[in-house]
Image (cartoon, rainbow, N blue to C red):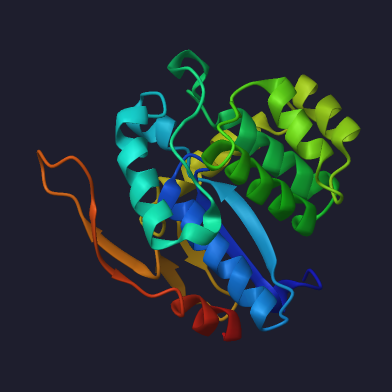
């Protein structure tokens, strides 16, 4: 078994999912606070493949605003560039995370995942395009950006991405994000509860408890 099995957290998510990005932020923050070095293994839950449509800006915009309000530390803000430059797909970004964690280790993959999410939500960077993804990777100390560039040019991890999509269709994965913990337990979108009534402009958060991730980290 891998040496990090006892502390490995597997998470299915989409980089274009604000709720997943919030949950991962809280997990990383809790781990830092408790001085726990988690091994986060990222697996793709590609919403655009499940829904057969591009990343829906009209849905993400109000979700991003709500998350930014409950967790200002993230530094998220509305899209600052022309709509024509919006990230219409996150497949390449998720493929890059897969490549990084296989080439340079889980910590590198998690570092790149966090950087890509920040680039999209806080800096309005179009993580749909290859040069932008590589530029983000270049700023990640654990990631060999040149080797990642080579892997993405060859598409060596695209099949793995689609394989994880097939896995995520099974009944055990409920959505983005879904965490599977070393003790055999799992939890879908922990720490936040919200409703979004049909016809209303934005979701309404009914409960937000980031301390849930302190308990997850301890487990």
Query: Is 190 on the left or on the right of 91, as rendered?
Result: left
**Rendered residue at 60%/30% (across/down):** 125
Q: Quadrant of the N terminus?
A: bottom right
Looking at the image, residue 201 sits to the left or right of residue 31; the answer is left
Residue 37: where, in percent of width, then height? 74, 74
Front position in the image: 110 or 157: 110
Where is residue 97 shown, x and y percent of the image?
69, 43
142 lies above or below 219: above
Q: How many tags in the picture?
A: 0
Q: Residue at x 55, y 42 (%)?
A: 122
Q: Is residue 194 visible?
A: yes
Residue reaching furthest top?
84
Which x, y percent locates residue 159? 64, 31
Horizontal side of residue 218 vs 205, given as left or right = right
Of residues 62 and 46, the one drawn nearer to the viewer in this rendering: 62
User: Residue at image x 43%, y 36%?
Assistant: 78
Q: Is residue 26 left or right of residue 140?
A: left
Q: Is residue 124 above or below residue 129?
A: below
Q: Is residue 176 visible?
A: no
Quadrant in the picture for the C terminus: bottom right
Q: Position of residue 163 (x, y in %)?
A: 56, 39
**Looking at the image, residue 109 lies above or below residue 199:** below
């Amino acid at each position: 078994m891998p040496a990090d099995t006892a502390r490995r957290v597997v998470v299915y998510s989409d980089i274009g999912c604000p709720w997943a990005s919030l949950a991962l932020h809280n997990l990383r923050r809790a781990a830092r606070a408790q001085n726990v070095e988690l091994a986060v293994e990222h697996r793709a839950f590609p919403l655009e493949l499940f829904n057969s449509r591009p990343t829906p800006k009209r849905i993400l915009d109000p979700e991003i605003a709500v998350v930014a309000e409950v967790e200002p530390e993230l530094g998220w803000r509305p899209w600052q560039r022309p709509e024509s430059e919006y990230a219409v797909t996150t497949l390449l970004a998720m493929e890059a995370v897969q490549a990084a964690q296989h080439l340079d280790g889980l910590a590198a993959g998690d570092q790149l995942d966090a950087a890509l999410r920040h680039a999209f939500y806080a800096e309005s960077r179009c993580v749909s395009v290859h040069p932008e993804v590589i530029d983000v990777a270049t700023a990640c100390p654990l990631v060999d950006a040149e080797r990642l560039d080579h892997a993405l040019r060859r598409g060596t991890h695209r099949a793995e991405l689609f394989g994880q999509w097939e896995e995520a269709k099974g009944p055990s994965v409920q959505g983005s994000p879904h965490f599977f913990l070393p003790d055999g337990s799992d939890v879908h979108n922990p720490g936040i509860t919200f409703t979004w009534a049909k016809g209303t402009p934005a979701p309404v958060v009914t409960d937000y408890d980031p301390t849930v991730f302190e308990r997850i980290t301890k487990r």
